[in-house]
Image (cartoon, rainbow, N blue to C red):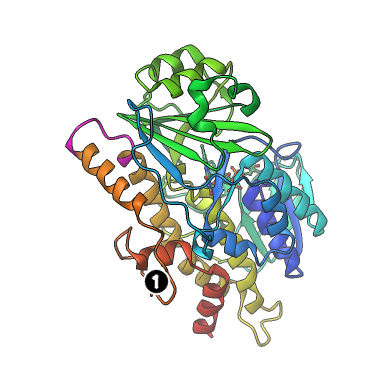
Amino acid sequence: MKIVVIGAGPVGLCTATALRQEGHSVTVLERRRDTQPLGHALVIQPAAVRALQYLKGAEESFSRVSVDAGALQWWSYRDTKPFATPVPAETLSRAERRFQTDRPSVQKLLHELAVANGAELLFGRAVQGVQDFGAKPTLWTTKGEKFTADLIVAADGIKSATRKILFPAQDVDPIPLRESIFLTSAPISQLAQDHRIAPWLEPGTKHGILGPDRFVLSRPMHGGLLGVQFIDVNHADPGPVDGNWNTPADIGLLRTRFSDFNVTTRAFLEHIQHAEKWQMATGAELGTWRSASGRIVLLGDAAHAMLPHAAQGLSQGIEDALSLARMLRWASKSGGNGVDIPVVTKAWVNLRKPRADLFMKQSTSNANIWSLPDGPEQEARDGRIRRMATRPPPNLDGVEMDMAADRNSPQFLKWARDYDVVLEGERAMEKVL
Ligand SMILES: Cc1cc2nc3c(=O)[nH]c(=O)nc-3n(C[C@H](O)[C@H](O)[C@H](O)COP(=O)(O)OP(=O)(O)OC[C@H]3O[C@@H](n4cnc5c(N)ncnc54)[C@H](O)[C@@H]3O)c2cc1C
């Protein structure tokens, strides 16, 4: 099949590689002049790690840019030591295996994989229009070039223009929020000179510091850096979503905003001269991720942009990519013994959308839970975190998956973490036939 992917972000590049490995001809159109290696720490969750096992070369590349940061240690913003330290697992089960990496490294490695697998990457090509014409959807760029394909995959991010073109009668703009995240980092070698920061530098640890309206996440990143994110869920009235990831922040204001946090947090803020501000937004709720013909689909942030607080944004994009590539095995060009592409994309949306929708909701709810004001609700939350930290991760062998079960139940954890999206895609296609 001839497939055109819009956007060379991590999800577009992952999709392109997965489709190439299935033998399709793939062209990626990216409006920027090069890949954009911006961003900060991110986690690839266990089910996405499992999906990446279907992508040749990914396991080794992701391992190379991942760090060992253990499970989160939890602090109150006023305390000088954690109130909950999870029991370290003796061996990591499949459902606990994550890549703790960062967006610039992931962007770079997925770019290399797409090139090595023979995807055609065309930079400086901003897609301007998309037409959903029967069996041959078409798009064109601002340079006037026209592309026709069997399938168009739009991975054009939270501000997806394709989404607006596909659903002209709906308001599908991203929803801006009051929340801002400030992204900072500093060399661990420099921070090690300051004993006040020592707890955050203990090897194999990462930290979450919870305060009213705000929380802080700290962990080592590839390249000898400590990455620290300052989350202010009630920062300011939202402006328009600009999609920028690198608006310089006012360090003085950041220090003032977190001046009631513990000494480790304040000491870290003394060491940095630069922070990037990210104005948060979430994707609008969509009825579907495919066009009327079923030959144009949205995936990644274009389909399900979510807050980062379930650490699932990119993981869901990876699951989208690997399942779509595998399910397309059931589509034949001629219609012969296989099914038509729209039948596959329908089954794919039915499989993927409920799962991504649930993580979108979970990420918003986590932001509220982690920024509760001091009081009984906050005390109850800390009690829950303490109890969960002392328990070893549940053994999920033989547990039945249930996405509707309680969030902390083994059934839900099985569905969230021990899920094989490629296998589920195959099962979904077998049901269709
Ligand atoms: C602070 C923070 C922490 C995060 N942490 C995690 C985490 O721990 N785990 C996790 O899984 N996720 C995390 N995420 C989310 C993750 O970074 C995103 O989900 C991911 O980058 C989305 O990838 P994408 O390829 O869909 O979109 P993008 O990265 O936005 O890429 C879209 C691409 O499309 C291009 N494009 C747009 N319009 C056009 C056009 N008209 N023509 C051609 N090209 C176009 C853009 O230039 C861009 O290159 C985090 C996000 C934030 C903000």
Secondary structure of residue under mark 1: loop
**Where are the magenta residues, as a range?**
369-376
Instruction: Report ligand 1 position as a quadrant.
Output: top right
The residue that disc 1 covers is 401
Q: Nearer the viewer, residue 62 or 127?
A: 62
Residue drawn at (80%, 59%) of the image = 117
The chief SS type of the magenta part is: loop
Above-or-below relation of 368 to 285: above
Rendered residue at 60%/36% (across/down)? 39
86 relative to 294 in the view: left or right: left
Is residue 250 visible in the rendered structure shown here? Answer: no
**Up-down: is 210 above or below 103?**
above
User: How far across and how far down the image is residue 136, in percent?
Assistant: 68, 65
Front residue of 132 and 427: 427
Q: Is residue 284 left or right of residue 198?
A: left
The x and y percentages for residue 329 are 66, 76
